[in-house]
Image (cartoon, grey):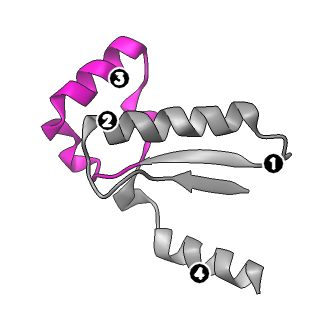
Amino acid sequence: HSHFVLFVCTAALSSMVAAICYAWLLEHTSTQDGWNPVPVINTTRQKMWEHRPAAWLFHHCGLDARALFFCDEVNLFSYIEWCSGLLQ
């Protein structure tokens, strides 16, 4: 099971870092087998070039931005509907 971690309705650097760090924290503290938090960056991959501080930080931390999911690559509405069906 994957659980998306998406912070605030902004593409600020702090939100990107928060999503990644919170997903890491959940991954390392969860006791549920098969539970995988997935950070989603709240901007499109094409607009990432506008976020030079994020690109700089990711580069210097050794984080490959090609390994990240961006909001235009994840169909969150279908995922929410699917999860709602599981709860019924």
- Could you say whether the residue bearing mark 2 is in a helix, strand or loop? helix
**Residue at the spot 66% in from the left edge and 54% down from the top edge:** 2
Q: What separation in Å lies between label 2 and label 1 (alpha carbons)?
A: 28 Å
Instruction: Give the label on residue 8, or none.
Output: none
Image quarter in which the N terminus is found: bottom right
Residue 14 in the image: state x and y as whole percent: 31, 35
- Could you say whether the residue bearing mark 1 is in a helix, strand or loop? loop
Up-down: is 12 above or below 72?
A: above
Q: What separation in Å lies between label 3 and label 1 (alpha carbons)?
A: 27 Å
Up-down: is 26 above or below 74?
A: above
Compare marks 3 and 1 and give the one earlier in the sequence.
1
Q: Amino acid under label 2? A: Ser
Question: Which stretch did the figure color magenta?
Answer: 41-69
Q: Amino acid under label 3? A: Phe
- Is 55 magenta? The answer is yes
**Residue at the spot 66% in from the left edge and 74% down from the top edge:** 83
Q: What separation in Å lies between label 2 and label 3 (alpha carbons)?
A: 12 Å
Q: Which residue occupies the foreground of this view, 54 or 69?
A: 54
Q: What residue is disc 3 on?
A: 58
- Contact between labelled residues 4 and 1, with CB atoms less than 8 Å apart: no
Q: What residue is disc 2 on?
A: 14
Q: Which residue occupies the foreground of this view, 27 or 48?
A: 27
**Residue at the spot 70% in from the left edge and 84% down from the top edge:** 85
Q: What separation in Å lies between label 2 and label 4 (alpha carbons)?
A: 28 Å
Residue 7 in the image: state x and y as whole percent: 41, 51
Compare marks 1 and 4 and give the one earlier in the sequence.
1
